[in-house]
Structures are given as structure tokens and as C-alpha cells.
Amino acid sequence: MALIDEKTLNALRARGLHISSPIAAFGDGVYVCKPTSTPGNKLTRPVGQYIAIDDDVPCPDIDAPMLRLLSENGKWIVDAQDSAGGMGGADFVNEWSSAEDAIADICDFYFGDPARMAKKER
């Protein structure tokens, strides 16, 4: 797996999304989070945050589930698994052939049809 290039990360930051430091355990993928200060889809229940270690970028207050973004074998993966013990009904893992498609998927989750995120409310 490879580090995600700054152009891709900056496209997400430009939408007001927060990007974690690369996470070696996830193949140098990153968490993508929507801070409470960024308008968009959100949940009414509390959501979990990642824990920053050492000099890692700390997670801001968020009001929507975190997504994982990673690049693996020429594919871009957007991972929204929150359930323990396997995939839950609202979990998804989407594979894309380009960074642009992965960015569009992430932006749709946070800023598109709210019904997609509403599934995570349960």
C-alpha cells in the first residue's frame, strides 16, 4: 500500500474535511472526518473519534462517522465499517479505480443525499 498523495488529501481538506496522519496499520491509509464546524450530513448520536499518538494530528470534534481512505493494488478504498464482528447493515467498503471517484464517494457521504448517512444513525 502507498501513502496517499497530497493532491488527493487537499481535495478533501478543501471541502472542510479533516485528515488524520497516515496509519501504518491500515497500509498508510488515513481517517477522513467531518468536523462539527463543517456543514453537511451528520448524526444526532455521538460518534467515535480516532486517538492521536505522539505527534499525530489530533481528531477534532466530529458529528459524522469517520471513513478510512486507502490505496491498495491500484484501487482506492473507502471504508465505513463501524460494526464489531463483521459488516453491519449500514457498513460499506467501496473500491474505486481512481482517486477522483473515491473523493466523490466521500463527498457524497458527507454532503450528498442524507439518507445514505441516516442508515448509520441506527
Image (tube, rainbow, N blue to C red):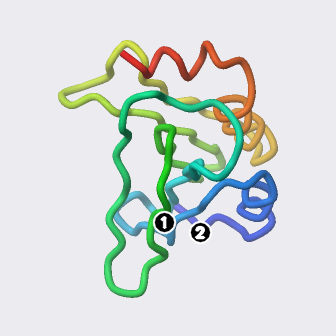
- Residue 81's disc number: none
| Residue behind mark 2 | 3
Residue plotted at (32% across, 18% down) = 88
Identify the residue shown where x is 37% and y is 12%: 89
Where 118 sits versus 102, above or below?
Answer: above
Residue at the extreme bottom of the image, as rendered: 55
Q: Residues within 10 Å of mark 2 (few under 14, many from 20)?
A: some
> Which of the two residues, 99 or 13, is positioned nearer the viewer here?
13
Question: At 52% from the left edge and 65% from the top edge, which residue is drawn?
Answer: 20
Asked whether the viewer can see residue 104, the reply is: yes
> In the rendered view, does 111 fall on the left or right side of 29?
right
Secondary structure under the numbered disc 1 in the rendered image: loop
Q: In the rendered view, would you say 117 is above or below 46?
A: above
Q: Is residue 21 above or below residue 95?
A: below
- Kindly check if marks 2 and 1 are in contact, taking CB atoms under 8 A apart as contact: yes
Frontmost residue, 54 versus 47: 47
Number of numbered labels in the structure image? 2
Residue bearing the label numbered 1: 28
